[in-house]
Amino acid sequence: MTRSILLASAASIAALSGAAHAEEPYDLGTIIVSGNLTPLPQSRTGASVDVIETEELEQSGSLAGALARVPGVSLSANGGLGSNTNLRIRGLDNSYVGVRIDGIDVTDPSSTQTSFNFGGFTTGALGRVEVLKGSQSALYGSEAIAGVIDITTPRPQELGFSGKTTLEAGSFGTYSGSLSLAQKSDRGEIALTYSAVTSEGISARAGDTEKDGYDQQMLTLSARYDVSDVLTLGASALWRDAEIEIDRSTTDNSGKNFTDQRGARVFAELATGAVNHTLSFSKFTSERRDPGGYTTMFDGDRKQFSYLANAGLSNGAVLNFGLDRTEESFASDFDTGAYDTNSAFAELQLAPAGNIDLSLTARYDDHSIFGDNLGGRIAGVWRMTDTTTLRAVIGTGFRAPSLYELYSPYGNSGLQPEQSRSAELGIEHEFGGTGVVKATAFYTEVDDLIAFDGASTACASGWGCYAQVPGTTVSKGVELAAQYDVNDRVSVYGNYTYTDARTDGARLTRVPRHDLVLGLEAALSARASGTLEVQHAAGIVPSPYAPVDHKVGDYTLVNLSVSYDVTDRAQAYLRVENALDEDYETAGGYNTPGRSVAFGLRAEF
């Protein structure tokens, strides 16, 4: 589903380096925010980044569904909409994935492993998503061993006042809607988006018929203003309130969980001659409640102070450098914990030739518990011809044990950080503006993997606890992606990922060895268009905790969507997911939705 980036126009190096002084505007193509310390055109970054634009997000009912179509990304869910959903990038789960919304780190410091739950997010509150793959600790610090998901909420696209609204009704008693309001001038912009979803849901637990409902409200705000030619001020904020019914056990299908998350970021950008400065502060809090549970409360808090500078050097080189301080804490019924990290980082961007770009990144982290960590990344892109591009990246990563892994009743204070190395090599070829094909080989290895060990006696609970897994975890494979315009009305696309992920020879659970997406888009008339898509996953190893009658295994999903432009600014659409009503599980003992139908209206004003 990342066809927009596959066909994005490429800008020349000279165009970028001279853009600030040019009298004529240049087309810089797709701009990548997450792949380097400062944004770059996609043609100039060696990082492997897939972009999901607004139009593609609208074809999915959820963020999880949109991400599952990206090469190298797979998901497993403990039920339907709103349930705990684990995203994996190249075989490594979401405890190795950094997630940011409008620059705010939204991974939960109080979760079992510091991570983000992708299960409850619908796409109405989202504007753009970047998926950065590979060990990225040199850019983002801990938790970025597998990659980073960078989310941007809706932004104004035109001067003046604008708005957009969506209303949708679908299967399982699901209703959702969103409203975005924005104002843009020559000096600034502000955007506000409210979204809500309610669903009767399905039973999360297999073998049970009692439905587990879900309700969520979310509000996001972003703003920036050019105070002068050299000073820009800005802010972003988010609020999310969610409630989900749960199956507490095989004999008790009652219970509710409540989540309240808040985040904010303020920043100032100052241009002082040859050096540009950005100073920011962000805060994120997560409060989860489980009345009736063994542990009833989980509170997490993160504060982050950051300074970033970039300076233009001779021969088109750019130096980015900065400092960062992150403070994290958690509290539960039984325990509390906190730690902080001070970091210094630098990135040198070089253009040794007109068709070659290199970036060299180094990062030093001083963790209050685990001490020093030095990491780095080398990324390069070689535009071999006007139509063929070669990319390569080598990087290191680390993941500090989460506060829960250290201080909960199942914690182990003797844990050490996980360390990773990753490499990838990719090639991309365009076919005269009508199509593109990409191939990327990847390799990641992780030492001192942390996992729960039910037989461990390293903690006082007596029920097992977290421990380092012997051996090295290796995830390797290849991603293939292609898109081709058959004519001006029909386009076909597809991607395939082969992943072999193992720890000391044993395959990682819930990771598809083969993951295939095939799709066709067609203009059915001057106002109507449709999409047919097939997703197939195979070679999945279930968790050892899966019940004997689990349905984890190969599965095939067929998805359909049709849209009709009622007016130039209003659209009606119909979406059918799992059209053949496949009966399958991605996590043993947990249901997935059967055939579902949704009808909606979108309008801009």
Image (cartoon, rainbow, N blue to C red):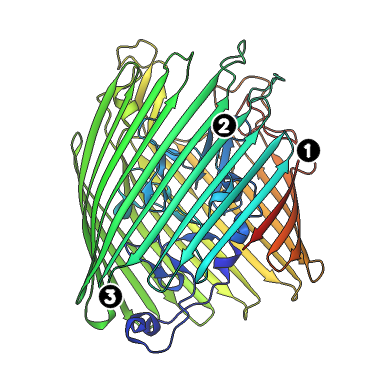
The residue depicted at 37 percent of the width and 43 percent of the height is 263
Q: Nearer the viewer, residue 422 or 142?
A: 142
**Mark 1 is on which residue type?**
Asp
Q: CA distance from mark 1 to mark 3?
A: 57 Å
Left or right of 267 on screen, residue 168: right
- Is there any visible trace of residue 127 in the rendered image? no
- Is there any visible trace of residue 482 in the rendered image? yes
Assign a secondary structure to mark 3: loop
Q: CA distance from mark 2 to mark 3?
A: 47 Å
Q: Which residue is mark 3?
A: 229
**Mark 3 is on which residue type?**
Asp
When asked about the image quadrant of residue 436, the answer is bottom right
Left or right of 583 on screen, residue 290: left
Circle on res. 126: none
What is the quadrant of the C terminus in the image? bottom right
Q: Which residue is mark 2?
A: 83
Q: Position of residue 478 (x, y in %)?
A: 54, 55
Assign a secondary structure to mark 2: loop
Task: Pick out the residue farthest to the bottom.
Answer: 23
Q: Which residue is mark 1?
A: 581
Given contact means CB atoms under 8 Å apart, are the residues at marks 2 and 3 in contact?
no
**Mark 2 is on which residue type?**
Ser
